[in-house]
Image (cartoon, helix red, strand yellow):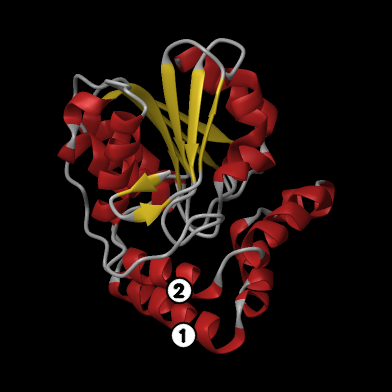
Amino acid sequence: MKINGTELAVEVDGQGPAVLLVHGLGGTSNYYQVLADALAERRRVIRVDSAGAGRSAAREGITVESHADDLAAVLDALDIGSAAVVGHSMGTLVVRALAARHPGKVSALALLGAVAEPAEAGRRAQRDRAAVLREHGTGAVAPVVVANALSETTRRDKPEVAAFVRELVMRQDAEGYARNCEALAAATDPGPIAATLPLLLITGSDDKVGPPSVSAALGAAHGNATVEILPGVGHWTALEAARETNELLLKFL
């Protein structure tokens, strides 16, 4: 689907009220496969590979805000007035920006492994990762993602999840991935989440990328959010704890 001048891979399954699923840095729409299958029994499920990720083309000037505007345009192209929106990792910044820039498009918000605006050290790390990607390709960063973003419990007890995360990263276009790293490095906080917007936050107790403190702070600032911390789970929430995440999201929706 051509969106804002760029070819984006968009998948639509099921019938019913719309749910938009937004992946994070290094991910694709396949991050949500288990959840999408469960939701499609009663929902219209929309998944988008963000510009520069997965099967979508890269473009100049990728930002958190440009991703948010792309999502709004996808909903318009599908004639969807508003949707419940789920975001993971960097995607939590994107969907928060979507809710801030296009408030009528978002009927409820769920954040998995919510991340904050990067500190300066985090910005440098993302710019460094972009440089590594351009020089050495995705194979140079995949082991680091697996080691740092998955919990020790997942790596030990669910090696198939570690293998899938490695494959998600390895299948990225290196330049597109680098541009998205730079987008995260430049990201700023999208602002407060409207208190009238239903909000669910799910993260893992062992998440080093989007630690529980970030979700707790967002929930407290919102005032009426539900915050769920999954024990023994790292940053790839919907893969490391697929059953638990599905149950919480189905109940919320």
Residue 182 x/y as whole percent:
35, 72
In the displayed structure, does residue 181 sit left or right of residue 241? left
- Residue that label 2 marks: 178
Between 45 and 199, the one nearer to me in the picture: 45
Q: Residue at x 31, y 46 (%)?
A: 70
Using the rendered image of the protein, determine whether residue 136 is visible from the camera's viewpoint: yes
Circle 2 Cα neighbour tier, 10 Å, few/some/many (<14 / 14–19 / ≥20): many
Disc 1 secondary structure class = helix
- Relative to 75, say whether 15 is above or below: above
Residue 13 x/y as whole percent:
56, 24
Give the Cα separation between the discs numbered 1 and 2: 7 Å
- Relative to 223, say whether 61 is above or below: below
Residue 18 x/y as whole percent:
42, 19
Name the amino acid type tagged 2. Answer: Ala
Circle 1 Cα neighbour tier, 10 Å, few/some/many (<14 / 14–19 / ≥20): some
- Residue that label 1 marks: 131
Using the rendered image of the protein, determine whether residue 231 is visible from the camera's viewpoint: no
Residue 38: name its quadrant: top right
Residue 37 x/y as whole percent:
65, 24
- Relative to 63, say whether 179 is above or below: below
Disc 2 secondary structure class = helix
Q: Is label 1 in contact with label 2 (beta carbons under 8 Å)?
A: yes
In the displayed structure, does residue 53 sit left or right of residue 247? left
Name the amino acid type tagged 1. Answer: Ala
The answer to which of marks 1 and 2 sits earlier in the sequence is: 1
Between 30 and 5, the one nearer to me in the picture: 5
In the rendered image, the quadrant that contains the N terminus is top left
